[in-house]
Amino acid sequence: MAGQYKTSMKMYSAWNYEKEIEDLNKASEKGWQLVKGGLLASRFKKDPGVRYRYQMDYRRIDDMARYIETFREQGWEYVNSTFNGWHYLRKLYDPSLPEEAYEIFTDRESLREMNGRWARLGLALGIVAGVAALLYGVWMILRFQIPVALVFLLLAVESAVLLRGWFIMRDPDKSRNRRGDGALLAVFLAAILLGGTASIALAANRVSLQTEQKAGDIDHPVIDSRWADFEVKYPDFYYVDLTVEAEKPVDFAILNEKDEPVFEIHEKSYRTENRRILLPRGRYRLSFSAETGYRVEFGIG
Amino acid sequence: MKRSEPLSESYYYILLCLAKGANHGYGIMQMTEKLSGGDVTIGSGTMYGATGNMMKKGWIREILSGEPGQERRRLYQLTDAGREILRGEIARLRRMLENAEEV
């Protein structure tokens, strides 16, 4: 008989693994037997003739043969492992057996150890995300730009979610949280993914220009020199660095498509760093005119 | 003698079940249930973790069964260090019981 299979795209957070086990048991009762558990999707085989009870374990297995044998001795069949260290196990359901026969962790210490293994990972990732969020936060305050703000927001939310997971998992009693948050998790991951892609795309589309004009030896005047063109693909704050040293006042301007200046100076000596200007979408032109002996350094990012 | 941490119930019973000779995981589990009158059970996850940890600590070691037909069967055997730990734990438990009787 050709087997009938289905793939279920249900996600569970690590601190909700008990909810996942409960759902696997319910699916088994309805005739859908897990054959491959996964982080994003799980595969089931239709077999109404049997009923299994499932369990999940989280650890780094250093001896797979010993692991499988230790479980087989008590009637457990090893199903599969996910790449990130979760293992699925199942045992044929026998109504005459007591509930304890379907537990794989029979003391507080070993359950605490298992939860603790994930909790340590959650804490480490949460701290890394938190520190990164902090750095991006400082960067955002110093130089507000949309991609930076987006990354800050994503890291802050990610850190909060991971630290909440750590908080739940570090105590086995708190992990008895059977309220499924799969939909929330899916939205959260989608937001992180979309937001991450968007911030990378926005950052890649930003203009960053470093340029310099030196004409100290030129004795004939330069009048209205077109220097560089650049394009802003989405409105955001930009930060200008400009140094001008000249014998006679230099006219320097950033002009928009209508030749209106969005930034301009007329100075012999001028220096600014991180001057914030809001640039709408469009093409811009750097223009300057100097009569003699000048040095102009310009950067925008 | 330096005082060691009290053993968990599972660690204690695993060591105890190996005191009289090597045994496999299932044998340890059955013997534990029998000894404790069904009060203590050792599930597979607990067993794998506990035996792994105790092998790392050098309290038990893995040997292959020499019995015909079961040559490849994995057995656990108490080491001298493990026997010492078990002795220490029994002495600790005995002292605790004696203290209870004194009060």
Image (cartoon, coloured by chain):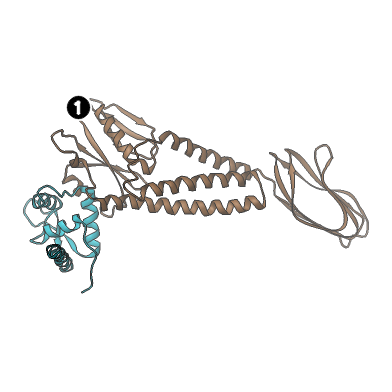
The amino acid marked with disc number 1 is Gly
The x, y position of residue A4, in whole percent, is: 29, 26
Picture coordinates of residue B59, whole percent (x, y)? 19, 64
Q: Residue at x 62, y 53 (%)?
A: A139
Q: Is residue A255 visible?
A: yes
Instruction: Please state the chain letter of the residue tagged with numbered disc 1 in the rendered image.
Output: A
Q: What is the x, y in percent for residue A192?
A: 51, 41
Q: Quick one: which residue is furthest to the left in this view?
A: B68
Q: Residue at x 48, y 38 (%)?
A: A188
What residue is shown at x 58% (from left), y 40% (from top)? Answer: A198
Instruction: Look at mark 1 in the image and give the residue it sits on.
Output: A49
* Element on which disc 1 rests: loop
Residue A180's image quarter?
top left
Chain A painted colour? brown
Query: Seen in the image, is B70 located left or right of residue A141?
Result: left
Tell which of B9 and A87 is nearer to you: B9
What tint does the image give chain B?
cyan
Q: Is residue A143 left or right of residue A72?
A: right
- Residue B48 vertical placement versus A40 (above, below): below
